[in-house]
Image (cartoon, grey):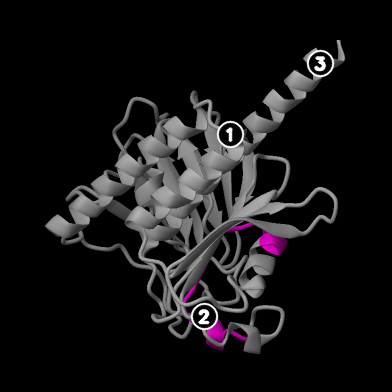
Amino acid sequence: MNPGLPEEQQFTLSEGTVTIGRTKDNAVFCLHKSLSRKHAQVDFDGVKVKITDLQSKNGIFVNGKRVSRCELFEGDSFRCGDITFLLEGTTTRSTKVSNQGAFHQDRAAQTLPSPFAIDPSVARRPTVHATPNVTVADDQRYKDKLFLLIRASELCVSELSIDRVLDELIALAVQVLEVDRIALLALDDATLDMRPRVIRTFVAPHQYPYSTRVVDWVVDHGSPASFADVSRDRTLPGELARDASVRGAMCVPINPGGGTIGVIYADSLSRADCFRPDDLALLRALANLAAVAIESAALRNSERQTVVSR
């Protein structure tokens, strides 16, 4: 809660059952009027995490949809009342992550920690972290990203063409993300393949402007991912040799709710394990805005065709 400030909190998720609510008899409590006394129950068996609504007044929303009970995966955000959480460190979606479970209480999705920023070689149970030491640079970084998201949301309700909107979203991203290459790919309705729609590169041209192995993994799993060193990652499908120059990478799906219709991909050719937790969260937020823009453009186009046909 309150990312980057002294009152930021993280909570350990041990095996068993914990409850979330606004009273102190809950393992995770927050004195907020939007929460019920006992709002939700989270069950963790060491591998899977499930959340259940305890007949709360304001409900539980997982990735934007209200649910009464569902399984949570690493990277899933869920909201109890007006309080947003992020689950980080389960094993269900990535072979890179050891058996861990923790969630971070937060109100601003753009600064949530990455669920993949965990050392796979270290098997340890999550712990409650002390209040982080936030620097002036970190504070400015968060402010820059907040401003970016405000500007990005304005683009999505503008009268610009969809191609211009997507290009501007990527242009905004490179203002705050330290990347060598970034691309937005969209589903081709005819071939059902992911085709580049926007590509920005800040290094010498390469034969492959992005890692198809990373893109294919994200499309297949439908979940965001950050990779420490793609050039050494043998868990990804495809030819390892094609990614010999790719170090750190992250990729998120563009999904308006009916399936993945595109992805946003970013990488570094010089640095491994280079992307911070909030970098992945920011890319996820931009992907959500891109999904809204694409769906809105398709709806406007359909309405114009209807008017012409009449």
Please name the residue that numbered disc 2 is placed on: 246
Region rendered in magenta: 219-234
Q: Secondary structure at mark 1?
A: loop
Looking at the rendering, in which quadrant would you find the N terminus? top left
Q: Is residue 117 visible?
A: yes
Residue 194: name its quadrant: bottom right
Q: Which mark is residue 199?
A: none
Please name the residue that numbered disc 3 is placed on: 308
Q: Is residue 292 above or below residue 94?
A: above
Q: Secondary structure at mark 3?
A: helix
Q: Earlier in the sequence, mark 2 or mark 1?
A: 1
Q: Amino acid at mark 2?
A: Val
Residue at the image position 38 percent from the left and 62 percent from the top:
277
Could you tell me how far apart the alpha carbons at marks 2 and 3 are, in whole angstroms? Answer: 48 Å
Residue at the image position 50 percent from the left and 51 percent from the top:
284
In the image, 160 versus 234, the foreground residue is 160
Q: Where residue 179 sits in the image (x, y, percent)?
A: 41, 67
Q: Counting other residues with Cα less than 10 Å from the Cα at mark 2, is it few (<14), some (14-19), or many (20 or more)?
A: many
Residue at the image position 53 percent from the left and 35 percent from the top:
60
Please name the residue that numbered disc 1 is placed on: 161
Q: Is residue 233 above or below residue 22?
A: below
- Residue lying furthest left: 136
Q: Where residue 131 sits in the image (x, y, percent)?
A: 20, 58
Q: Amino acid at mark 1?
A: Ser
Nearer the observer: mark 2 or 3; the answer is: 3
Residue 231 in the magenta stretch? The answer is yes
Could you tell me how far apart the alpha carbons at marks 1 and 3 are, in whole angstroms? Answer: 19 Å
Instruction: Say left or right for 6 vs 271.
Output: left
Instruction: Say left or right for 219 vs 88.
Output: right
Q: Amino acid at mark 3?
A: Val
